[in-house]
Amino acid sequence: MPRFFTDALRFDPDTQTGHAVLDGEDGRHIARSLRMRIGEPLTLSDGRGFDYDGEIENISGDTVTVRLTTQYKNESEPTLRVTLYPGMPKSDKLDLVVQKATELGAAAVVPVLTDRSVSRPDGKSAAKKQERLQRIALEAAKQSGRGIVPEVGAMLSFKEAVRHAKGTKILFYEGGGLPLSKCLPAGETEVAVFIGPEGGFAPEEVKFAKENGVLTATLGPRILRTETAPLAAVSILMYMTGNME
């Protein structure tokens, strides 16, 4: 069933009725690309963890009115909030990371400019990249049935990112560290995951991270590519906390 995110909805939990209006890109997609008709069902999400069943009530140009019939809590959101801090990689590798991390359950992705980052976009280019990545997260959230759209944050320096991170902070380091299974305290609900760019983290960055409460960890004896490591880390964390069952 087609699925869309919108905050332009009104719903009365007591009567289980409401309405929503979709226009712009979503309205065009429904009316022109999907060629949906009045009476057809679809699912809306408010982006705050609730889904709504509804059916199309009216289509006027690119504006679609939906009659909402049921509200229920989205069941796909994990109990663990994972924020990824990937070192800026080359090319379009970050596109893949954002898409797949969204599918796996990450809550946010914040690109990090590290000492060894080859890609070093200026402010204008970084803003355009952030906008594109946010669109990728939105489409991946629709496809995977998420209850929220993960936020793609503005690019930070490594030191800013370490200070910005919340929860248990874990840096994956090719120089070795603890097994991931020993890094997560029982009952933890928030984790920050740092992944280096091509070439990994500089020793000075690792030293700074450790001095600021970041644990160094390993994903095993093989060195993973910068686009593979964050997806492996999120998958393992979700499995460890029962969010892949």
Image: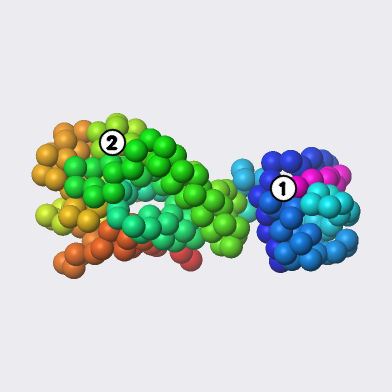
Q: Nearer the viewer, residue 102 or 80?
A: 102
Residue 96 in the image: state x and y as whole percent.
Answer: 41, 60
Q: Residue at x 79, y 46 (%)?
A: 21
Tag 2: Cα neighbours inside 10 Å, few (<14), some, or many (≥20)? few
Report the coloring of the rendering: rainbow
Q: Residue at x 34, y 57 (%)?
A: 91
Q: Which residue, given by chain and number where applicable, does mark 2 sit on?
A: 157
Tag 1: Cα neighbours inside 10 Å, few (<14), some, or many (≥20)? few
- Residue 221 visible in the current orientation: yes
Mark 1 is on which residue type?
A: Gly
**Quadrant of the rendered image containing residue 212:** top left
- Taking the image as shown, residue 228 lies to the left or right of residue 238, namely left
Q: Which residue, given by chain and number where applicable, does mark 1 sit on?
A: 24
Magenta stretch holds residue 123: no
Q: Is residue 189 above or below residue 105?
A: above
- Taking the image as shown, residue 74 lies to the left or right of residue 115, namely right
